[in-house]
Image (tube, rainbow, N blue to C red):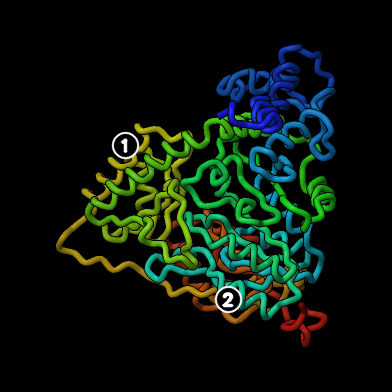
Amino acid sequence: MEKKMSKQALLEFNLQKREPFLEALEQYVLSKPVPFDVPGHKMGGFDNDLEEFVGKRTYECDINGPYGMDNLVKPSGVIKEAEDLCAKAFKADGCLFSVNGTTGGILTEILGVLRAKDKIILPRNVHKSVINALILSGAVPIFVKPDIDPLTGISNGVPVEEYAKAIEQNPDAKVVFAINPTYFGLVSDLKAIAALAHKHGMIAMADEAHGTHFYFSDRLPLGALQAGFDITTASMHKTGGSLTQSSLVMYKGKRVDWDRVKAVFSMMMSTSPNSLLMASIDAARKRMFFDGDALLGSTIAKCLRARKELSQIPGLSVIDHSYIDGKGRFGIDDTKLVVDVSGLGITGFDAYHELKMRSNVQLELGEFRCCLAIFGVGTTDEQTNTLISAFKELSENHYSKRMVHRMPHFNFTYPELVVRPRVAFNAPHRVVPSKDAAGEISAESVMIYPPGIPLLIPGERITVEALKELSFYKKHGGIILSDTKVGEISIVDRTKWYRASDLDSEF
């Protein structure tokens, strides 16, 4: 392979063998500096139970930008070198290391591109961080409908036609936003969406919290930048092998003002970034560049084997390639395993808890019909076998040929947005019992975690349907995230709204 490359390509290929930040970190730690800077544990001098558990070296590597280690918000040395190598590995034009996860990345890209009252066309099943970015930026969301599976209730991708309608109705929109992939592994037709956005002079932006691995295997859907998107943020830790909370912001082309994005990035990121997180990105990038294709091939094979075997277990069904329809289900991530357990007469919440308590199998999440297992580059054959055995035991404990199980089902549609999220969030508000909130305007985000997709966002008119779904999740042990106590909702207090007559049109 190396012999067929041009000299420039070979040089860039060999540069990927470097880990500039990790190398500098190792050199710094091994030099045994005398630390009169922060942090206060002084490279492991503060004996404690965590240090005993994880090892002194972890603390030795926890340094805070000392001499020679560069500065994350204004890099010019080893961090800049590491980010540039990462950009080349992803075939991007620029890359930033986020130590605040993809949440920080999404805040960076949205605030870096949009101003107050700029319109952004986006799916309603976005992560809470997108809604937070809308509140901070003051941008106007134009929501498009994702494909919602009527059987499982899962929100998938968005058909291109939905984006086209929104663009036709909002020709002044600045950004078209897509999720790649969704939490459950479904993708939209990103090439067509990017082309549509660019045809109308709009920027194509993506949330790839679960899509980092797409860039390293031809057996997976396209990464957003590969499909023609202009800017994306990707969780290196979720599917790329780095430590939790380490992520990337990347761009390609000339449509994005990268200098402004970097300026916003410096506002969003800590001035005391974790050196272990940055080093883990450096190391994961190198491993994925050279071995990612083989590692992901093995990962995919394990997931497909699990899909096949679980589909033959009584009471279980799986989402596979037969689920794809070329629209909102344009493609599927073959490292995600979605299992419908409703044929066992139990909920996904039940299965999630039972698999952990009986077999010590930790799934990503349970939903009311489904469970989600994520296979990664670190997944082993032994772990895969344990997962399959655990589901077999689950079936043996619950399946009955004599019973027809009818699980609860919601024909869920998202509430209507009547006021900008920032306006509603900052409006006078009051807290009411959830049961009394129907018809009111939400002043907060209410969501189930994981996956962190809001059932309600600030500015939406609260529906009876949304309250029923919220009640169902509460009853079955779902983790509800909101600004108020469980069972209460913060609503816009229209009696104190200083422009009450204009509330519904305050965009």
Vertical side of 347 occupied by 385: above or below: above
Which residue is disc 1 drawn over?
385
Does residue 185 appear in the picture of this structure?
A: yes
User: Which amino acid type is shown beneath numbered disc 2?
Assistant: Pro
Residue located 27% across and 46% down the image: 309
Closer to us: 233 or 271: 233
Residue furthest toward the bottom? Answer: 501
Describe the element under mark 1 as helix, strand or loop.
helix
Of 208 and 217, the residue lying toward us: 217
The total of numbered circles placed on residues is: 2
Crowd tier of the residue under label 2, counting other residues whose Cα lies within 10 Å: few below 14, some 14–19, many 20 or above: some
> Which quadrant: the C terminus?
bottom right
Classify the position of the N terminus by image quarter. top right
Query: On the image, numbered disc 2 is attached to which residue?
Result: 415
Q: What residue do we see at 72% from left, 50% from top?
A: 251
Q: Residue furthest left?
A: 402
**Secondary structure category for the residue under label 2:** loop
Residue 70, percent from left and from top: 82, 29
Query: Residue 73 placed where, x, y %?
Result: 82, 40
> Horizontally, is 159 left or right of 336 in the view?
right
Q: Give the quadrant of residue 325.
A: bottom left
| Position in image of residue 359 (x %, y %) | 33, 39
Picture quarter containing residue 192? Answer: bottom right
